[in-house]
Image (cartoon, helix red, strand yellow):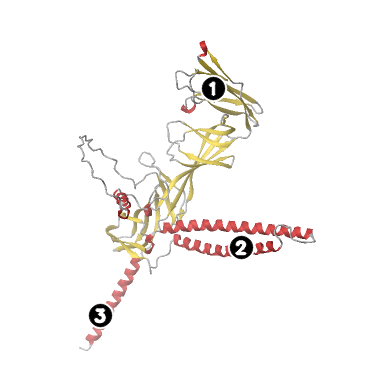
């Protein structure tokens, strides 16, 4: 009988031990490690795949410290064949007091704040130096006319004072500019940080795992995006253009992407999945409306128009600023979508900073031409004409390089019906154009001087100062009559290679290869007749 208490005590100890063990197991389970392995990035969103390892016999998996920026409705869980997935729950928990690591976004915000604090100290110190130099300048007269007998010494002192003042004030402007840049970055990051930073999410997944394996959890977020970018480099010696595909990406999801496989897709899953459908086109007779009574004088304190606007915006389901894409998104018409693989493992912190990746390059044979429109600009510009590249090339920005040097930026949109694409590569200063204006006249002709006749013209001399022959293209806008009463007779020498250049009525193009060090002449003469008393617009 005396052994019962001891037995009861041992039983209690075993129960406590079991409870502690279960609690420890639960605590261990609650910290199931996972990492982001794959990301598919769209122009205005992203699909993130997080992978975790499930041990044999596991009953549940808990993924903690997840941001609230992803769409919980898009959550999808799948595992290896040996793992059966059961109930999936998403919970929002306070971030205060959690052991979750801070994101790079928060770290960068603190770093920028520290940088601004240090910069403020430099600004104050520089301001003191400026005040001191101002005081010294006032004591010496400032303008160098202060009384002194040693003019050489006074001159040296004045020069030194001017140099020091210039350095101080230049430094002050640089510091102010840098402070403005840091402030802009800080404001952008704080806006990106959003209001959900005080909460986190936990995903609890019930599983049955007779054997171990991998579990993959995917979800979508609107705080990521990409846009295409390109770089075109012309080699004037080899007469080719190398076009490099690039992608500018950014994300502010609240979790860093480290060593992930990144795919870029032209699809847009956030768009409406169904197109518009027609409704009946109804016709009716409007009934006469009663005459409205005079409206009372407006009472401005009772105005409710702004509230109506807000409700209308909500009714149409416009996205809030927290879900706004990081890029201006253009609709890309493709056969469903096209994906691009970013080579290697990608590192992309959650700081909303735009990063550019190189995808691939393609070399295109080019026809190089020096193009000039002398009536508007006497300069010649290097133009490369290439065949339209194969495949999907979404429109984006294009950086232009000529023989290694950047010459400008334009837009690149290869989609279209034309099989040829022209790319501009800046001024060609070794091609000069001289413009001469031949004699012009205006006179009355015909019986009883019933019509006016006016002759206009232009003469262009183009010289090639290159060491090699070059093809030039001279563009000329000719007068085009919009009335049967206005007659235009045009004479060209030599005959233009193209009329209605690029489907523009009245625009002609001369094209000629000019040997090195030689010149070519192009002339245009126009005889315009019209009624004597008519007022003709567009005459030059």
| Residue in view at x 60 percent, y 63 percent | 127
Q: Which residue is mark 2?
A: 126
Report if the CB atoms under discs 1 and 3 are less than 8 Å apart: no
375 or 503, which lies in front? 375
Give the CA separation, mark 1 to mark 2. 66 Å
Residue at image mark 3: 11
Residue 22, compared with residue 43, is above or below; it is: below
The residue mark sitting in front, 1 or 2, is 2
Give the quadrant of the N terminus: bottom left
Q: Position of residue 54 (x, y in %)?
A: 34, 61
Q: Please tell me whether residue 212 is drawn above or below residue 509 in the rendered image.
A: below
Which mark is first along the chain, 2 or 1? 2
Q: Dot 1, how many residues are within 10 Å of its Cα: few (below 14), some (14-19), or many (20+)? A: many
Residue nearer the viewer, 520 or 139: 139
Whether tag 1 and tag 2 are in contact, CB under 8 A, the answer is no
Left or right, 131 with reference to 243:
right
The picture places residue 35, in percent across and down from the top left corner, at 40, 59
Q: Can residue 44 be seen from the camera position used here?
A: yes
Upstream in sequence: badge 3 or badge 2: 3
Q: In this view, which residue lies farthest toward the top?
A: 447
- List the residue tagged with mark 1: 496
Seen in the image, is 259 located left or right of residue 492? left
- Locate residue 525: give its quadrant: top right
């Amino acid at each position: 009988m005396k052994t019962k208490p001891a037995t009861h005590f041992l039983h209690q100890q075993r129960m406590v031990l079991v409870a502690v063990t279960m609690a420890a197991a639960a605590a261990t389970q609650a910290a199931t490690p996972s990492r982001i392995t794959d990301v598919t990035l769209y122009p205005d969103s992203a699909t993130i795949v997080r992978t975790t390892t499930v041990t044999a016999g596991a009953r549940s998996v808990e993924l903690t410290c997840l941001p609230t920026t992803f769409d919980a409705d898009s959550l999808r869980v799948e595992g290896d064949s040996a793992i059966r997935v059961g109930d999936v729950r998403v919970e929002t928990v306070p971030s205060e007091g959690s052991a979750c690591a801070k994101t790079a976004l928060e770290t960068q915000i603190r770093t920028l704040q520290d940088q601004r604090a240090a910069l403020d100290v430099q600004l104050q110190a520089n301001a003191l130096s400026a005040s001191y130099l101002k005081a010294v300048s006032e004591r010496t007269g400032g303008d160098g006319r202060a009384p002194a007998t040693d003019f050489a010494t006074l001159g040296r002192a004045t020069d030194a004072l001017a140099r020091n003042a210039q350095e101080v004030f230049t430094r002050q402007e640089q510091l102010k500019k840098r402070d403005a840049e840091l402030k802009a970055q800080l404001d952008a990051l704080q806006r990106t940080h959003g209001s959900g930073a005080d909460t986190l999410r936990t995903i609890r997944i019930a599983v049955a795992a007779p054997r171990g394996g991998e579990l993959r959890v995917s979800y979508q977020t609107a705080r990521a995006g990409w846009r295409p970018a390109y770089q075109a480099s012309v080699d004037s010696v080899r007469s080719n253009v190398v076009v490099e595909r690039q992608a500018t990406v950014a994300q502010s999801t609240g979790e860093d992407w480290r060593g992930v496989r990144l795919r870029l897709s032209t699809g847009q899953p956030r768009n409406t999945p169904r197109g518009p459908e027609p409704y009946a086109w109804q016709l009716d007779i409007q009934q006469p409306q009663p005459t409205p009574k005079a409206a009372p004088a407006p009472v401005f304190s009772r105005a409710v128009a702004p509230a109506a606007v807000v409700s209308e915006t909500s009714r149409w389901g416009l996205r809030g600023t927290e879900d706004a894409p990081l890029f201006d998104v253009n609709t890309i018409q493709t056969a469903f979508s096209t994906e691009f693989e970013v080579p290697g493992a990608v590192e992309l912190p959650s700081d909303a900073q735009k990063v550019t990746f190189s995808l691939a390059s393609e070399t295109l044979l080019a026809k190089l031409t020096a193009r000039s429109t002398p009536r508007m600009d006497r300069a010649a510009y290097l133009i490369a004409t290439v065949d339209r590249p194969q495949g999907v090339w979404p429109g984006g920005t294009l950086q232009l390089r000529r023989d290694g040097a950047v010459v400008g930026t334009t837009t690149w949109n290869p989609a279209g019906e034309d099989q040829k694409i022209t790319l501009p590569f800046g001024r060609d200063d070794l091609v000069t154009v001289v413009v001469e204006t031949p004699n012009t006249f205006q006179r009355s002709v015909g019986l009883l001087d019933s019509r006016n006749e006016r002759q206009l013209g232009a003469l262009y001399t183009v010289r090639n100062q290159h060491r090699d022959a070059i093809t030039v293209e001279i563009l000329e806008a000719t007068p085009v009559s919009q009335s049967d009463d206005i007659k235009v007779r045009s004479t060209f020498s030599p005959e233009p290679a193209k009329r209605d250049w690029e489907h523009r009525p009245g625009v002609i193009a001369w094209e000629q290869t000019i040997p090195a060090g030689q010149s070519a002449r192009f002339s245009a003469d126009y005889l315009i007749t019209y009624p004597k008393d008519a007022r003709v617009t567009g005459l030059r």
